[in-house]
Image (cartoon, rainbow, N blue to C red):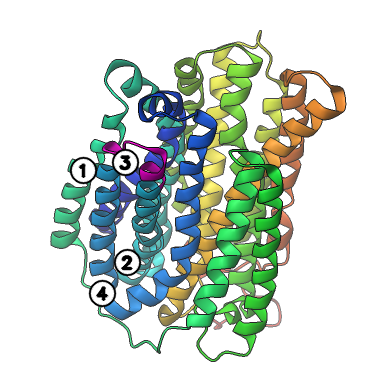
Amino acid sequence: MNRTVPLILAVALFMENMDSTVIATSLPAIAEDIGTSPIALKLALTAYLVSLAIFIPVSAWVADKYGAKRVFRIAIAVFAIGSIACAFSGSLAEFVAARFLQGMGGAMMTPVARLVLVRSTEKRDLVSAMAWLTIPGLIGPLVGPPVGGFITTFFSWHWIFLINVPIALIGILLSGRYLPHVEPAGVKPIDGTGFVLSALAASGVVFGLSVVSLPALPPVVGVIVLAVGVCSAFLYVRHAIGTEHPILDLRLFRNPVFRAAISGGSIYRIGAGATPFLLPLLFQLGFGLTPFQSGMLTFASAFGALAMKFFAPTLLRVGGFRTVLIAAAALSSCFIAASALFTPQTSHLIILAVLAASGFLRSLFFTSSNALVFAEIDNKEASQATAISAALQQITVAIGVAVGGGILESVHHITGEPIGPSAFTIAFVIVGTISLLSLIPFLRLPAGAGAAVSGQRVRNSPDEPSGSP
C-alpha cells in the first residue's frame, strides 16, 4: 500500500481534530482578550459544530461535481483562512463568524479525504489505509488540551490558530503533488429541498445538544432548536424516500453490512464520544489536577491508538470484521467503565495503562467500522457513504457529550452536592454500557462480511461445493 496518500490526508485531519479541541483549554484567555465571558465564548465551539453539520451533507455532491482532490485542497485553504480570522478576531461576533468559516473547510476536509482514500485504494489495502487515517481523529482531541495549555501559558492564544497556516500550506502543496487525480463524477442537479432539510436537521440536533450540554444560552433555546432538528429529520426521511437523487441517499441502508457499520459505529460513538469530555473533568474537578497534568494523563490513549495500526490488518485478516468488532466493542466498553474505579489515590501508572489499552481498542473499533462502511458498496456509492458516515459522526459525538454532561448535571440536582468523583463513577458506567450496546448490530453479520477488505479466508459451508470461491 502507498502510505503517502493516507499520511497526507491524515495530516490535514489531524490539524482539524486538534484545533477543534485545543480551543477549549484557551477559552478563558481568549474571552479576556476580546472582552467577553468564557461561557459566552462557548458559542464559538457550537458555531464550528453547526457549520460542520450544515455542510457535510453537501460535501458528496460538491466532490462529485468538481473533483475530490480539488475540493480537498480548497477545503484546506478555507480552514486556514478561518484560522487566520480567528487569530485576528477582536470581538465575540467576529470570533464566532471565524469559527463558522473554519467549520466550512472542516466539513469538506473529512468526508472528501475519505472519498479520495477509498477511490484511490484497493479494497485489500483499505484497512491499513483507514488505520493511518483514523489515528489523527483519535490523537487530535487528546493532544489538543495539553498543547493548547502550553501555547496559551508560554506564548499567546493567537498561535493556536496561526500554526495551522504553515501546516495548511504544506498540505496543499503535498496533496497537489502526490494525491491521485479523481475525476469528477456525473451528478444530477443539487437536491435543494433535501439540502435545506438535512441542514436544519443536522445543525438543529448538534446546536440543540451543544447548548444543553454547554449552556452558553438558556437551555430552553437548546430544547426548541433540538425539536426543530428532530422534526426536520423526519421531514427529510419522507423527502428522501420520494426523491430520485436525494442529497443523502438513505437507500444505502438497504445494504445490511453498511447498515450494521453505521448503526454500530453510531451507538459506540455516543458512549466513547463522552469519554474525552468526562476524563479531563474527572481529573480536574474530581482529583484537583491542573489542565496540563490532566492532558498528560489522557495523552496515554494516543500511544494505544498508534500501536493499533500495526495490529489491525492482521487481526481483521485472522478474525474478520464481525469477530473483531464484537470483541473490540465489548473489551473497550469494559475499559471505559473501568474509569469509574479511578480515585485520587489511584496510581498514575495504572491510569496510564488503562487509558492506553482503551485507546488501542477504541482505535481498533473505529478503524474496523470505518473500513466496513465501504466494504460492500460500489465505488460510485462511496461519496454518499462518506457524507452519511461523516454527518452521523458529528451528530453522535454531540449526543455523547450531551449524555455525559446530562448525567453529571442530573446527579448534581438529585444529590444537591457539587459534581465530584461519585458523579463520574455513575457517568462512566452508563456511557460504558451504551458503547457495549454497539455490538448488537454486528451480531447479525455473516462471518465473512467484508472479507474482500479484511483479507479473511472464509470456509465454505457444508452445502457449498468445494470449488466455491
Alpha carbons under labels 3 and 4: distance apart: 32 Å
Kind of residue indicated by mark 4: Val
Q: Which mark is residue 130?
A: none
Q: Which residue is mark 1?
A: 165
Of the two numbered discs 1 and 2 in the rendering, the one whose residue sits closer to the viewer: 1
Assess disc 1: are there few (<14), some (14-19) or many (≥20) residues with their C-alpha within 10 Å of its C-alpha.
some
Q: Nearer the viewer, residue 437 or 173?
A: 173
Q: Which residue is mark 3?
A: 86
- 2 and 4 marks in contact (CB < 8 Å): yes
Alpha carbons under labels 1 and 3: distance apart: 12 Å
Kind of residue indicated by mark 3: Cys
Residue at the top extreme? Answer: 345
Q: Quadrant of the N terminus?
A: bottom left
Q: Earlier in the sequence, mark 3 or mark 4?
A: 3
- 2 and 3 marks in contact (CB < 8 Å): no
Q: Which residue is mark 4?
A: 182
| SS type, badge 1 | helix
Assess disc 4: are there few (<14), some (14-19) or many (≥20) residues with their C-alpha within 10 Å of its C-alpha.
some
